[in-house]
Image: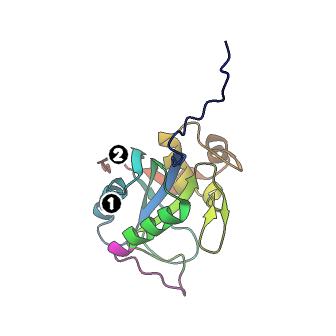
Amino acid sequence: MTDAFPIDVDTLGNLKPLNQVVFSLGSNLGDSIETLQGAVNRLAETPNLILVDVSPVYLTKPVGNVEQPDFYNLVVIADSTLEPLTLLDRCQAIEQAYERRRDPDRPGGPRTLDIDLIVVGKRTSETPELMLPHPHAHERAFVLVPWLDIERRATLPQGRVDDLVATMDTSVVRKLTDVRIEKP
């Protein structure tokens, strides 16, 4: 038996699609573990954003040529109906709350907190404000290795995350077994 009328599941006319959002968080100034836990807590408090999972914490060698301490990194997966630019605004507000300073002379320099949007569902963006998927995620072990810990079937336009990880030097990231950021 077939329906005589097409089914419109959005009977209210105002439902928004639920997208999986992947965030990469890092810190190498101050009390990085406390900062990362606070940032995860602030993400969890965001309306229309549901935290799904938090990866283990990794100690990571910095990328680039700026002399600085190692980073503490993790990945957060959430579900959200928020627009990508709203998510970006929220990330930047959380960074500012933790006194993130952007030094145009040292863009890869140390920071109290860095939150990057890696993917927002299948959404794409190529604006000066936001590139989605993140244009360098496929090259960064500090994003892909923690992501793979909590989502074995993760993909990017460049391929499956497990295949990408298999081709990179993962000696630059080390899982910390004595530290855990809790999902609120």
Whether residue 9 is situated above or below residue 181 in the rendered picture: above
Q: Position of residue 123 (x, y in %)?
A: 63, 54
**Residue 90 belongs to magenta span:** no
Q: Is residue 79 left or right of residue 35?
A: right
First to last magenta residue range? 96-106
Query: Main structural element of the magenta stretch: helix, strand or loop?
Result: loop
Write down the quadrant of residue 52 in the picture.
top left
Query: Which mark is on residue 177?
Result: 2
**Quarter occupied by the N terminus:** top right
Q: Is residue 97 magenta?
A: yes
Task: Tell me where residue 169 appears, x and y as whole percent.
Answer: 61, 53
Residue 122: x and y in percent read 64, 49
**Location of mark 1 (residue):** 42
Element at badge 2? loop
Q: Amino acid at mark 2?
A: Thr
Colouring used for the render: rainbow
Question: Crowdedness of circle 2 by 10 Å Cα count: few (<14), some, many (20+)?
Answer: few
